Amino acid sequence: MKFLEIMQVSKHFSHPTKGRIEVLDKVSLEMRRNEFITIIGHSGCGKSTLLNMVAGLDAPSSGAVCFKEREIARPGPERAVVFQNHSLLPWRTVLANVMLAVDAVFPAIPKGERLAKAEHWLGVVGLKEQLHKYPHEISGGQKQRTGLARALAMGPELMLFDEPFGALDELTRSQLQDESLRLHGDEHLSVFMVTHSVDEAIYMSDRVVMMNNGPNATIGRIVDIDFPRPRERLKVFESELFAHYRNECIRFLFSRRHGAQAAAGLLSEATVEPVPGVPAPA
Amino acid sequence: MFATVTGFLETIGLTWFVPPLKIAAGIDRRYEARRFVRMIGLPGLAIGLFLAVWWALSTQVVIKGHALPGPREVYAAGGRMVGEYQAARRVHAEWLRGIDEQVVANPTMSRAEVMALMPDTAAPTYLDQIGVSLKTVFTGFLLAAITAIPLGILCGMNRAIFEMVNPFIQVFRPVSPIAWLPIVGIVVSAGMADVAANSFWAKSYVISAVVVCLCSLWPILINTAGGVANVERDYLNVARVLNLGWVGTVWKVVLPAALPQIFNGLRLSIGVGWMVLIAAETLSQNPGLGKFVWDMYQSSNDDTLAYIMIAVLTIGVIGFVLDRMMIALQRLVSPGVGVQVR
């Protein structure tokens, strides 16, 4: 059975002054179970829109997204989302935020077991000590961990990561990347991630899917990443293969960006903007 | 334990009591002393200045042969009112004893029948009038909250409903209580033609409460609708991913998220309601503070101005306490959400 299939999906929005905006144009992609797939592209290329359609939070204008050969019509806990800005409910403690998910998804099992479930997942992400704190009392990394625990607690078949580490500092970010990779291995997760960090995409994924610039964005290129799992950060980052992948990605993202914008007359050839995750050329 | 107490006082907005407590306990003395000066010293100074100016004016100004009562005269009048109240309590106790005696003397009659034969003819005391005013304002306020919160939630959740309700909000919100009163008076009087004047549901009470409701409805409605409409999209997306359903989403996500703003509306509304009530009472003759002020105005004597000033102060202080109560409630129900006390 096919796990996730995005078939000829287009999306357009109506805007009061700009009229119809074509975001995605006939995007097709397939994902296998247990795969870690990353969508990368410049802001505004519609990568979050694509994720929202897989989540069921948004509907395609044409085409279809199928999960286990069924068209996705609405959101569901089997496709859990880890949101960009954690979106924890601020009036609920860490534990209560996770309990919200457990109560909603497993109403049939006894209260005690539900509580144990929530505590288990918070333990897995290293928040055993923070159960009764409110979101405003914990750090950004801990909030994102709580968001991760909430998603895991839904017992999802597919995890959707919407730039979950984007707002974190470099060190916390690396830590959470490593832990997410560990979880991907231990819990046999399937992860569909959206990011704008090239390094993150290469380090974490099995395949990096690069989008063209919008409007009318499509998938430009897919790079298969052949590092064995479990991955070790230093080994991966210091390898020549990593440099090779990175060059490949950057070349694509750069040429597309310049191509599109020079054509529109927006950017002169002299100005080179830094690519996220890459030091600016000296 | 100590920290819990001071923390609770801070939470519910009784911040004034914290510095003296902490200074007495020797915690953060310098900081708390500065806070004490800022929160109690400066307002105290201003009140002192106000009293001084008032006193100076009262020695100069004469209105229609009566001197403008100064702070001391008003204080004395307050003392007399307390005396009158105590006397009235004694009369009331006397009356109750009389009833008891008659009940014993006439075993064939019920207590209610005896009371109907020997009605309490004493005029209501000032405290009774305050009680009536509070009862009336809370009735109107609760009526408004019960109608406006659900309607506000519907408006906030559903754009179409909002567009339908909005014209009514825009047109009826600016209407003064004085304009509502005649309509409400006529409708209520017609509807309550058979209700006895001395029952709990006195006509003047119902009229005043309904006018309070009509005027304090709008802040609750607008704030509830605004709070619900502005619930963060991400929270709603969480609810959608969890398939919480309409009721679950409203109950577990929308309502808690909008609660601070709903309470903002409630706070504004009880302020409006209290102001409206005094106007409504003067016109509908509901035996509360508004009627007291009106009666004093009608019966001009040496004490009139002093009594009215006491009423004004009472109205102000009660309004202030009501506002504080709402802030305390708001903070208790939504911890972690800062409310500016101004």
Image: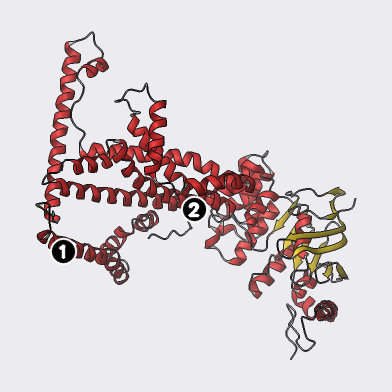
Q: Say which residue appears at 45% left-offset and 41% top-offset.
A: B144
Q: Residues within 10 Å of mark 1 (few under 14, many from 20)?
A: some
Q: Say which residue appears at 26% left-offset and 42% top-offset.
A: B289
Q: Mark 1 or 2 closer to N-term?
A: 1
Question: How far across and down, in percent of the image, does residue A144 sit?
Answer: 64, 62
Give the colouring mode of the picture.
secondary structure
Q: Secondary structure at mark 1?
A: helix
Residue in the foreground of this view, choosing between B86 and B242? B86
Label 1: chain? B
Does B51 appear above or below A243?
A: above
Q: Amino acid at mark 2?
A: Pro
Q: Which residue is mark 2?
A: B260
Residue in the foreground of this view, choosing between A221 and A200? A221
Q: Secondary structure at mark 2?
A: helix
Q: Residues within 10 Å of mark 2 (few under 14, many from 20)?
A: many
Residue depth check, mark 1 versus mark 2: number of the one nearer the observer: 1
Q: Amino acid at mark 1?
A: Ala
Label 2: chain? B
Between the C-alphas of marks 1 and 2, the distance is: 40 Å
